[in-house]
């Protein structure tokens, strides 16, 4: 089928008109392509990362070195997805959530390919990560604590996790984006 822009289009899930370089806290979720379990497994609520999962953790810590105004907060690498909170501390040209996500996906994908070739990691088909990602602007301390707890306890809820195999990338109705012209709350 030939490309037709009237029927072949992708809608952005980003908040229209929002500047993702504004200081504040952001909840990010990345899923592997086809929700394949590349990063380990969970048994009886206990997360067991493999070398690939540990590699994802390593690159998460490197985000703060690449982007001096981005602080890495709570995170968890799950078998087929990744949750984190990034805080942008100051607004700087060229540093925003999409740039940090793109860099993180690139670094993890490149190292994963090296792992496939040199260490026998499970190969992936065309892409390691899904093209899109879920983000949520954290607006206040209550939401921040709720999301931190969600991330911390995610392995315990693996059997009922929405990202375990269901198509929807949403984490839950309580985490939907609520537009605000004032931007996200800056959290400690």
Image: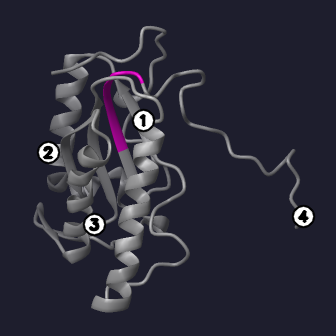
Badge 4 marks a residue whose secondary structure is: loop
Give the label on residue 152, or none: 2
Q: Is residue 27 magenta?
A: yes
Give the label on residue 67, or none: none
144 and 44: which is toward the camera: 144
Quick one: label 2 or label 3, which is nearer the N terminus?
3
Where does label 4 land, which residue? 2
Q: Is residue 165 visible?
A: no
Q: Using a 10 Å C-alpha cutoff, classify the residue at mark 1 as few (fewer than 14 neighbours), some (14 to 19) or many (20 or more).
A: some
Give the label on residue 79, or none: 3
Question: In the rendered view, would you say 50 is above or below 116?
Answer: above
Query: What x and y, as percent, mark residue 35?
Result: 42, 65
Residue at mark 2 to residue at mark 3: CA–CA distance: 15 Å
In this rendering, position of residue 27 left or right of residue 32: left
Badge 2 marks a residue whose secondary structure is: helix
175 and 135: which is toward the camera: 135
Q: Which mark is nearer the camera, 4 or 1? A: 1
Identity of the residue drawn at 60% across and 24% down: 16
Q: Are marks 2 and 3 in contact (CB under 8 Å)?
A: no
Quick one: label 1 or label 2, which is nearer the N terminus?
1
Where does label 1 land, which residue? 95
Q: Which residues are magenta?
A: 22-28
């Amino acid at each position: 089928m030939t490309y037709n822009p009237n029927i072949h289009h992708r809608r952005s899930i980003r908040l229209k008109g929002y500047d993702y370089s504004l200081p504040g806290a952001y909840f990010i979720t990345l899923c592997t392509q086809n929700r394949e379990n590349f990063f380990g497994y969970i048994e009886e609520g206990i997360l067991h990362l493999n070398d690939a999962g540990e590699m994802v953790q390593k690159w998460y810590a490197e985000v703060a070195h690449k982007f001096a105004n981005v602080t890495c907060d709570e995170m968890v690498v799950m078998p087929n997805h990744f949750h984190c909170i990034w805080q942008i501390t100051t607004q700087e040209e060229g540093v925003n959530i999409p740039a940090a996500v793109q860099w993180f996906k690139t670094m993890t994908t490149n190292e994963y390919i090296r792992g496939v070739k040199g260490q026998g990691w499970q190969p992936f088909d065309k892409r390691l990560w899904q093209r899109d990602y879920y983000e949520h602007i954290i607006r206040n301390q209550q939401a921040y604590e709720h999301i931190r707890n969600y991330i911390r306890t995610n392995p315990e809820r693996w059997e009922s996790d929405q990202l375990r195999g269901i198509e929807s990338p949403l984490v839950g109705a309580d985490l939907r984006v609520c537009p605000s012209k004032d931007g996200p709350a800056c959290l400690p």
